[in-house]
Amino acid sequence: MARMHTRRRGSSDSDKPAADEPPEWSDVDEDAIEARVVELAEQGHSPSEIGLKLRDEGVQGTPIPDVSLATGKKVTEILEENEAEPELPEDLRNLLERAVRLRDHMDENPGDYQNKRALQNTQSKIRRLIDYYRGDEVDEDFTYSYDNAVEALGLE
């Protein structure tokens, strides 16, 4: 599939191995994995960071290569069940952080036209995502602006 603001296709990626069950060497209890996921979320980690930490550090010293294979649920599903999900979806939060960074840069460097274009593209992506999430994960009356982004991120 093509990217949104260029005519190029996305970069190719390696595929995950086709596995139906977790490997034998990773035999951690599902409850221990879920407890660790909730603990990491309460420390402020995003769902993708939680997956990386479980892969690298593991639970009780045993790495967890794939949370969904080990528990039958995705990290975000575990967080929803335990009411520990983040306020904003991770993709929207990352775009808002990028837009705030670019806007701050533009205030200091008004002649940087390349970053002005990058800011416009990022704001376009944010508006599309807000329309997608409106009502479910984002308030019905939320609209994108720099001030709303700073407030939503808690950067005030």
Image: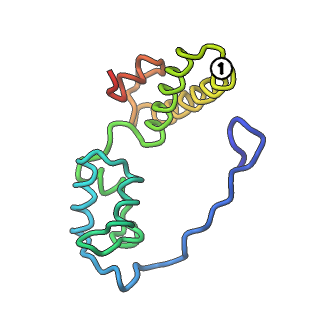
Q: Nearer the viewer, residue 54 or 16?
A: 54
Depicted 65 relative to depicted 96: above or below: below
On-image quarter of the C terminus: top left
54 left or right of 82 in image = right
Residue 122 is drawn in which quadrant?
A: top right
Residue that mark 1 sits on: 112
Residue pictured at 38% horizontal, 52% vertical: 47
48 left or right of 39 in image = right
Horizontal and vertical percent position of residue 2: 72, 46
Horizontal and vertical percent position of residue 155: 34, 25
Residue pictured at 68% horizontal, 59% vertical: 12
The type of residue carrying mark 1 is: Asp
32 left or right of 149 in image = left
Residue pictured at 66% horizontal, 15% vertical: 111
Residue pictured at 68% horizontal, 54% vertical: 11
Q: Secondary structure at mark 1?
A: loop
Horizontal and vertical percent position of residue 146: 46, 18
Residue 113 is drawn in which quadrant?
A: top right
80 left or right of 31 in image = right
